Image: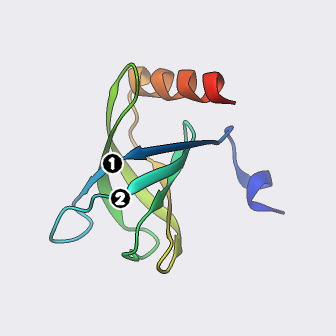
Amino acid sequence: MTDSDKRQARRISYPCEAECYGATSNPLSPRISDLSVTGAFIDCMIELPVGSRMTLKFDLPTAKVSVTAEVVHSMPHFGMGVRFVDLSDEQRQAIDKVVQENA
């Protein structure tokens, strides 16, 4: 089974700046490189272990997203795949709209 087979939602390339709190003693300022309603890939040189949780904040055209994210895949010196844990319905709809418009 490939990674794309495991994904439950359409993922798009969506580069944007983000803020990350709680994963380390200092806030991180990573970039999101791709996005779906279930999670994102974060470009970041700092490796966090799978299972680490953080607050991830980023802006969409119609909403500001602040969500708890859990690391589900980590690639040293490259980035991390994260799963969104507590998206609100409004945030999920805003992400879905971006995904549908950019698919």
Disc 2 marks a residue whose amino acid type is Pro
Residue type at mark 1: give it: Ala
What residue is drawn where x is 39% and y is 19%? 62
User: What percent of the width, then of the height, locates residue 20?
Assistant: 28, 55
Q: Is residue 49 above or below residue 102?
A: below
User: Residue at position x 76%, y 53% from top?
Assistant: 4
Element class at badge 1: loop
Which residue is farthest bottom?
A: 76
Which residue is painted at 33% across and 48% down in the image?
18
**Within 10 Å of the Cα at label 1, are there few (<14), some (14-19), or many (20+) other Cα atoms?**
some
Q: State the count of labels.
A: 2
| Percent x, y of residue 17 | 35, 47
Seen as rendered, the residue at the extreme left is 25
Q: Quadrant of the N terminus?
A: bottom right
- Image height check: is 54 above or below 91? below
The residue under the point 40% across, 23% down is 61
Mark 2 residue element: loop
Q: Is residue 98 left or right of residue 3?
A: left
Q: Say whether marks 1 and 2 touch (CB < 8 Å).
A: yes
Work out whether 28 lies above or below 93. Answer: below
Mark 2 — residue?
30
What's the CA distance linking mark 1 and mark 2?
A: 6 Å
Q: Residues within 10 Å of mark 2 (few under 14, many from 20)?
A: some
* Quarter containing the C terminus: top right
Q: Which residue, given by chain and number where applicable, does mark 1 sit on?
A: 18
Residue 81 % position (x, y): 53, 60
In primary-sequence order, the first of circles 1 and 2 is: 1
Return the mark for residue 29: none
The residue closer to the viewer here, 22 or 31, is: 31
Position of residue 98 measured from the top left corner of the image (x, y, whole percent): 54, 26
Left/right placement of residue 2 relative to residue 32 reads right
